[in-house]
Amino acid sequence: MSKNRTPADQILDLSENRYKLSTLRHNDLITQVRQVPAEVRGGLRIVELAGSESVSDLGRELEQQIFDSVFGDTVPHTPELMTSEYGPYEDASQFYVVLDEASREVAGVLRTLQGSKNKTLDDLRTARLITSDKGQHPLFDRETTWDLGTVAVSPASQSGGRRSLVSIALYRALFSGLDHAEAVHWTAILDVGVLPIFDELGVPYSRIEDIADMNYLGSNARACFGRVGDIRDAMMSRSRNADHETRTTITAILNGSPMVPELANLGRRTHILQSSA
């Protein structure tokens, strides 16, 4: 994935609502993001973007749409709510945006928070569910922790094999990013529907301080953390005892092997990974 950045004059005033784009602005950002050098696999362009870059608003737009469609009946995820929730964390955000080359539309988005800002831990402390970051691990340090924010697939990409390809591209971006960063731990508030996917892939995780599952912005969620260094070995161990499809999926995620349409079952279930929405 490319780490090339868009020019400085394309960085937005963060006071704007970045979760609701006009058609004109959306189309302009699509044109811009297609000019960023990027990895292209299976007809999917995978672009890495800093949260301060204007083109990252394509990811924010999809975040808001997916969260509102899935959890909106309980808690409407309006652009204003998303701005309120993520406003203090925009400068710490890193996005991976997946663009469908055929339709020229955003097929998926992944957001992480890097550096000292960690929405998961902040929200848990605000709710008085934890009193210290160190409860997770005696060597726990926010500076070397990635907070997993969002992984979501667009409605237009949620049918058949296409959904699996987008999902694999997003997980590949996440684990590749963790692999190459100096991250030691990861944290997340995950919708419990995601946990069977982590189990199927062999991703190791633990509850944060044995906190019970909770309602989190309309989602039935669990506060989790893990050690980044444990992920690859655990997933490889899982692949040795998995069926062909799961084994091929794990290989595609970890090693970037060709993504092919028969990788369908996991993809059909990896519709949304919500954390710290």
Image: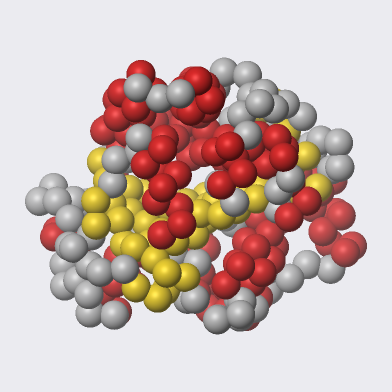
Q: Is residue 159 visible?
A: yes
Left or right of 68 in this view: 192: left
- In the rendering, at what x and y percent does residue 101 appear? 81, 35
The quarter of the picture where residue 77 lies is bottom right
> In the current view of this chain or complex, which residue is farthest to the left?
138
**In the current view of this chain or complex, which residue is farthest to the front?**
243
Give the side of residue 21 with respect to residue 179, left or right: right
In this rendering, is residue 136 above or below 250?
below
Q: Is residue 160 above or below residue 128?
A: above
User: In the image, is residue 9 above or below residue 84?
Assistant: above
Q: Is 82 in front, or is 157?
A: 157
Q: Residue at x 64, y 72 (%)?
A: 68
What residue appears at the point 39 percent right and 66 percent down from the top-left corner? 221
Q: Left or right: where does residue 261 sit relative to residue 242?
A: right
Rendered position, 202 above or below 256: below
| Residue at x 66%, y 69% (from the top left corner) | 69
Q: Position of residue 58 (x, y in %)?
A: 71, 55
The quadrant of the picture occupied by the N terminus is: top right
In this rendered view, identify the residue nearer to me: 162 or 93. Answer: 162
User: Which residue is located at x 89 percent, y 62 percent?
Assistant: 24
Q: Quadrant of residue 75?
A: bottom right
Residue 244: x and y, percent? 50, 20
- Image side of residue 92 versus residue 124, left or right: right
